[in-house]
Image (spheres, helix red, strand yellow):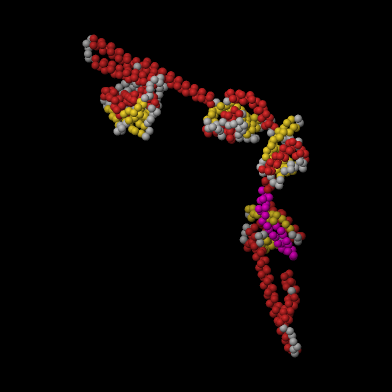
């Protein structure tokens, strides 16, 4: 209606323009009255024609403007809504539809309140009521939601139409701003908490030393009211020498752009108190100053200093020192003696992590757990462990630690001692080895006396007894048993001789009087000689001895010792192999030396008894297949001679199927 009135008002003006155009086109000359009337009629027609043309042009321009306005309306970044007094949407642009997460056509005739979150509905209703009531622009901030799912926060401006039937709403998405404000609020709250729980005194200062802000824990004894500091300069509230020292530190922090630290002392109620001041540059020529009471630390350091001389003398004598871990500062203070054990110079004050990193890998977990239990639960510890000092040398140490509590019952420090016990550990190790050697010697002595008392006595007893019988039968000229008695005497004598030879070689080995004289020898030839010596014993039982040797079997070894090894192993196989059995002696050249095996198909050895072989303390010996006696000494001698060559000896066996004894002679 408003647009129609404007158009009617513009008609006279449009007519004047049309007539002006016609005047420029022609003029009315003196004509007869009839023609004049006709010309007037034609003139009127021309005027209307011109008016129509001009109206069409203005309509075209108006349409273009309307289309432009519509395009701007639809593509505007802000949301536009037209609603009535019932909050029904009659028109909206694309941005508005996007805010409500729906298609534009589906939102027409919808109640806009449906999209307002429950917590914002009261604010929104008040906003609309005031807009329609006052016909003035109103604003508010609300949050949207669909099916209880949160949508953006929006800023609304409302303008009511002239007839008060419609309200045009402009909606701007302010979600990001709201999120930023919330993050800022949380950050400020966290900062307040940090400041509240911080045990330090906090100042915000200028580079000229003016105090802008101040905070101190209310429970500390050095708390003063903020009014004492605020708006004042350092020189107004502190002694001039301390204030100047702080100003100098401020200058250092400003110049470097990094934290600068200083310490100073003040006298309060006749008592000296020590403080550490850490000054950190911020922005706009402002700095933060963190002041910490370090009186206890200073007193502890002074106490340590007073006792240092005595501790140093005692520590140097006993390789003993002390250490102190300040949990708040994460610093380990140690005496010079402890630093020396670590291989570090005097004044080495590491962090706890650095100090623990010196422990050998296998001990790190144990000492870490001990320190943590002491720090958290007050459990003392006393441990003997190894560290690897700065020179890479392993050092046995004894470290003792106990917790130190403050007046509030909190653990604030751990202190203890640290001692190099390498010499003690070496002495203990030497003692263990000595005890083991003594036991071995004692077992050797017992074995030696056992052989002399029993094993050596038995064959000689046979020789003496059967010799008497032989003499008696000869005197009585009863020659029937002479051969049998002679064979028994010969067999007993050979066993006694073998035992004596082993005893002599064993005793020489134990006393260090047996020289080790390795040389290049033909193993095959040596084996042939040993088998020749034992062939009679094998033939008496019908036992065959075979060899499996490479074409060349030279070995670098002590000939006498290697012969003894072969003699004892083959002799054992003969003893425990049944009549008509087979013994095989094999040798094989390996990359690292010669592997020799002696295999029989005899009675075999149980797995339990195999573990007792080659051991002097295990007196293991069984009778042969023809009740031959044994002492176990031969295998012990074999082990010692093989180990002299740097080789190994072992056995594999199955009961009833036989045994194989292996030994190696490494290349030299």
Report the residue at 63% width, 35% height from top. Answer: 330
Q: Which residues are magenta?
A: 156-183
The C terminus, quarter of image: top left
* Residue 447 drawn above or below residue 189: above
Report the residue at 63% width, 53% height from top. Answer: 149
Residue 163 lies in the magenta stretch: yes
Question: Where residue 169 appears, x then y in whole percent?
Answer: 70, 60
Question: Where residue 656 appears, x then y in whole percent?
Answer: 33, 28
Among the 4 quarters of the image, the one containing residue 161? bottom right
Among the 4 quarters of the image, the one containing residue 307? top right
Q: Residue furthest top?
A: 475
Report the residue at 30% width, 29% height from top. Answer: 524
Among the 4 quarters of the image, the one containing residue 200? top right
Residue 293 lies in the magenta stretch: no
Q: Is residue 557 visible?
A: yes
* Residue 239 drawn above or below residue 184: above
Report the residue at 68% width, 61% height from top. Answer: 81
Q: Is residue 572 visible?
A: no
Position of 560 with respect to 345 (left or right) is left
**Of the pair 614 and 245, the residue shown nearer to us:** 245
How many numbered circles are shown?
0
Position of 448 with respect to 223 (left or right) is left
**Of the pair 542 and 156, the residue shown nearer to us:** 542
**Of the pair 83 and 187, the residue shown nearer to us:** 187
The N terminus, quarter of image: bottom right
* Residue 627 drawn above or below residue 294: above
Q: Residue furthest bottom?
A: 32
Question: Where residue 406 appears, x then y in whole percent?
Answer: 67, 31
* Residue 468 drawn above or below residue 39: above
Position of 588 with respect to 316 (left or right) is left
């Amino acid at each position: 209606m408003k647009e129609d009135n404007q158009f009617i008002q513009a008609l006279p003006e449009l007519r004047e323009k049309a007539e002006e155009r016609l005047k420029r086109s022609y003029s009315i000359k003196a004509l007869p009255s009839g023609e004049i009337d006709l010309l007037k009629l034609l003139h009127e027609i021309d005027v209307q024609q011109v008016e129509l043309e001009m109206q069409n042009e203005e309509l075209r321009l108006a349409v273009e403007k309307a289309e432009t306005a519509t395009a701007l309306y639809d593509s505007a970044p802000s949301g536009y809504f037209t609603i009535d007094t019932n909050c029904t949407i009659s028109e909206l642009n694309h941005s508005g539809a996007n805010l409500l997460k729906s298609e534009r056509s589906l939102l027409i005739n919808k109640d806009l309140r449906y999209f307002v979150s429950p917590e914002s509905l009261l604010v929104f209703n008040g906003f609309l009521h005031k807009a329609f009531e006052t016909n003035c622009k109103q604003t508010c901030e609300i949050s949207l939601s669909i099916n209880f799912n949160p949508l953006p926060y929006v800023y609304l401006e409302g303008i009511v139409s002239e007839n008060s039937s419609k309200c045009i709403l402009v909606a701007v998405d302010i979600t990001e701003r709201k999120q930023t404000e919330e993050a800022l609020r949380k950050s400020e709250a966290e900062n307040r908490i940090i400041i509240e729980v911080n045990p330090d005194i906090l100042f915000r200062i200028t580079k000229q030393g003016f105090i802008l802000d101040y905070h101190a824990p209310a429970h500390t004894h050095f708390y003063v009211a903020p009014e004492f500091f605020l708006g004042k300069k350092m020189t107004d509230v502190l002694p001039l020498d301390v204030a100047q020292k702080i100003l100098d530190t401020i200058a250092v922090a400003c110049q470097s752009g990094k934290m600068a630290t200083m310490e100073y002392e003040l006298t309060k109620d006749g008592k000296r108190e020590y403080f550490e001041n850490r000054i950190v540059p911020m922005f706009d020529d402002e700095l933060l100053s963190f002041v910490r009471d370090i009186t206890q630390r200073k007193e502890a350091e002074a106490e340590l200093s007073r006792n240092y001389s005595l501790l140093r003398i005692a520590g140097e004598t006993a390789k003993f020192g002390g250490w102190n871990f300040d949990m708040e500062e994460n610093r380990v203070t140690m005496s010079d003696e402890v630093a020396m054990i670590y291989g570090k110079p005097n004044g080495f004050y590491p962090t706890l992590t650095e100090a623990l990193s010196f422990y050998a890998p296998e001990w790190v977990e144990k000492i870490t757990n001990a320190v943590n239990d002491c720090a958290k639960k007050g459990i003392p510890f006393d441990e003997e462990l190894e560290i690897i000092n700065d020179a890479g040398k392993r050092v046995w140490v004894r470290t003792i630690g106990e917790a130190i509590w403050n007046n509030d019952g909190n653990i604030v420090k751990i202190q203890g001692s640290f001692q190099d016990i390498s010499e003690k550990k070496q002495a203990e190790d030497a003692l263990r080895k000595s005890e083991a050697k003594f036991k071995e010697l004692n077992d050797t002595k017992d074995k030696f006396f056992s052989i002399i008392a029993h094993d050596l006595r038995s064959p000689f007893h046979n020789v003496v007894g059967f010799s008497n019988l032989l003499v008696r039968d000869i005197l009585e000229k009863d020659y029937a048993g002479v051969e049998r008695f002679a064979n028994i005497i010969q067999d007993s004598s050979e066993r006694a001789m073998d035992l004596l030879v082993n005893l002599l070689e064993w005793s020489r080995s134990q006393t260090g009087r047996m020289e080790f004289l390795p040389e290049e020898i033909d193993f095959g030839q040596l084996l042939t000689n040993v088998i020749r010596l034992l062939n009679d014993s094998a033939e008496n039982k019908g036992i065959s001895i075979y060899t499996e040797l490479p074409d060349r079997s030279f070995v670098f070894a002590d000939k006498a010792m290697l012969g003894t090894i072969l003699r004892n192993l083959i002799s054992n196989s003969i003893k425990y192999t049944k009549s008509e059995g087979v013994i095989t002696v094999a040798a094989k050249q390996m990359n690292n030396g010669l592997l020799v095996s002696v295999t029989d198909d005899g009675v075999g050895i149980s797995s339990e008894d195999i573990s007792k072989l080659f051991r002097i303390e295990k007196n293991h010996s069984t009778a042969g297949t023809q009740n031959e006696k044994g002492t176990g000494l031969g295998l012990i001698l074999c082990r010692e001679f093989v180990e002299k060559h740097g080789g190994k000896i072992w056995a594999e066996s199955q009961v009833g199927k036989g045994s194989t004894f292996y030994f190696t002679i490494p290349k030299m």
